Image (cartoon, rainbow, N blue to C red):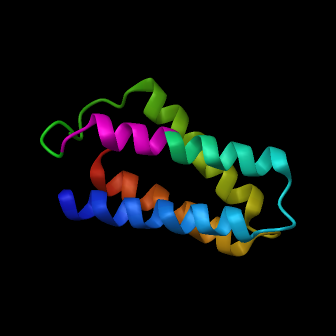
Amino acid sequence: MAEEAQELRRTLSQLHEQLRSSANLSEENRRSLQDLANEIRALLDASSPAVVTSGPADPRQTSLAARLADAEREFEATHPTLSGIVGSIIDALGRMGI
């Protein structure tokens, strides 16, 4: 589980880099993705690998997953790199049971 958390942190770093370098991304979209990344980091910081389980999902986590899926679809045509990174984040969270 620790490796998955490290991989997720690396993917979040890629997202931050893309957010910094995407000149044609609206400020609203940039803020939304930044907020999602911050929520994920907070989850990672609050959860040790022993605590993360595949039990019933926390409603905030479900909401987070839904918002990530919406972002992935929204950026699919206009920002494919961002969409791919968000998809990788969704996959990593799923593997971790978050």
Q: Position of residue 34 (x, y in %)?
A: 63, 47
Quadrant location of residue 31?
Answer: top right
Question: Is residue 14 visible from the viewing direction of this image?
Answer: yes
Which stretch appears magenta? 39-48
Percent x, y of residue 16 = 59, 61
Query: What residue is shown at x 19% (from left), y 41% (from top)?
Result: 48
In the displayed image of the protein, which residue is found farthest to the bottom? 81
Magenta segment main secondary structure: helix
**Quarter location, residue 67:** top right
Q: Residue at x 65, y 68 (%)?
A: 18
Q: Residue furthest top?
A: 59
In the image, residue 64 sits, relative to residue 33, either above or below, namely above
Residue 8 occupies quadrant: bottom left
Q: Can you say which quadrant of the picture contains the N terminus?
A: bottom left
Height in image: 9 above or below 31? below
Q: Is residue 40 magenta?
A: yes
- 57 vs 82: above or below: above
Q: Residue at x 54, y 32 (%)?
A: 63
Give the x, y percent position of residue 19.
68, 62
Q: Nearer the viewer, residue 83 or 9?
A: 9
Residue 88 shows in the view:
no
Q: Is residue 14 left or right of residue 46?
A: right
Q: Position of residue 40 (x, y in %)?
A: 45, 44
Task: Say whether residue 10 is left or right of residue 77.
Answer: left
Q: Residue 4, relative to residue 34: is it above or below?
A: below
Q: Quadrant of the C terminus?
A: top left
| Numbered label tally | 0
| Magenta-drawn stretch contains 32 | no
